[in-house]
Image (cartoon, rainbow, N blue to C red):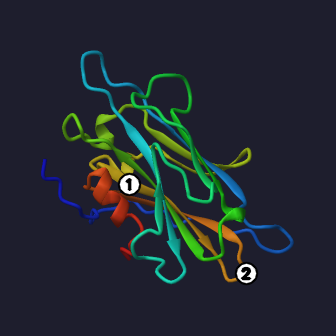
Amino acid sequence: MGLTARAFKSVWFEGREVRVTGLNKGLQKVEVALKWDPSPLGEPPHDLDIVAGTYRAADPYGAPAYLVHFDSRSPDGTINLNRDSRTGQGLGTDESMTLELERLSSEYVRVVIGITIQQGSGRKVFGDVANTGVRILDGYTELLASDFTGVAEATSATVAVFARDDAGEWGIQSAIRGFDADPEVFGQLMGKDYS
């Protein structure tokens, strides 16, 4: 199909950062929830996927140590895809992923969360998929929400970066950045530093 991988020049980027300090602990267990509407009758289904890339302290912006996506989980069981939809049918959340950050080995300092659209039935971008939305929750507290309007022409997008601080506590930074890359290539690009 010939999709080229590139980060968009005109990017909606919100630098809102959630850090927990003082006597409170950092983020420990979070959920990523993704929703979208099914494709119109007679059209190929829209298949969106949550992807988590985990990065070691020795190479925090390089290749991911491992990726978690459909049909996989982290080697240590700390990142799990709990629900996978290939069509967007159903009410509410279509896909969800749980990250147990407090259980991640100290060798990992970054986890990048992305969403990618499977391209098997022709090129699709977020603007082609109705009612897309992603939420990241810490219990009942919403840390981040996006409807992908800022990256409507992208086939994949990063949405958040979890980072471990010097004290070992986890925080989150919103990182909505669109990519024109198929899922395989996106998995290798999502953690790079594009600043």
User: Label 1 is placed on what type of residue?
Assistant: Ala
Using a 10 Å C-alpha cutoff, classify the residue at mark 2 as few (fewer than 14 neighbours), some (14 to 19) or many (20 or more).
few
Q: Which mark is residue 137?
A: none
Q: Please say whether residue 35 is visible from this viewpoint.
A: yes
- Is label 1 in a helix, a strand or a loop? strand
To which residue does mark 1 refer? 157
Q: Is residue 20 left or right of residue 104?
A: right
Calculate the distance from the C-alpha at mark 1 to the C-alpha at mark 2: 29 Å
Residue at the farthest top position: 41
Marks 1 and 2, the one that precedes in the sequence: 1
Q: Residue at x 48, y 40 (%)?
A: 133
Q: Which mark is residue 167?
A: 2
Give the quadrant of the C terminus. bottom left
- Residue 100 sits above or below residue 39 on the image: below
Q: Residue at x 65, y 78 (%)?
A: 165
Residue at the farthest right position: 23
Q: Please say whether residue 18 is visible from this viewpoint.
A: no
Q: Is residue 113 left or right of residue 27?
A: left
Residue 17: x, y in percent? 60, 67
Residue 147: x, y in percent? 45, 43
Quarter occupied by residue 170: bottom right
Q: Which is nearer the eye, 117 or 141?
A: 117
Residue 67: x, y in percent? 46, 58
Using a 10 Å C-alpha cutoff, classify the residue at mark 1 as few (fewer than 14 neighbours), some (14 to 19) or many (20 or more).
many
Dots 1, 2 in contact, CB < 8 A: no
User: Label 2 is placed on what type of residue?
Assistant: Ala
Q: Residue at x 37, y 48 (%)?
A: 116
Q: Which is nearer the eye, 71 or 60?
A: 71
- Is label 2 in a helix, a strand or a loop? loop
Residue 26: x, y in percent? 74, 67
Residue at the farthest left position: 2
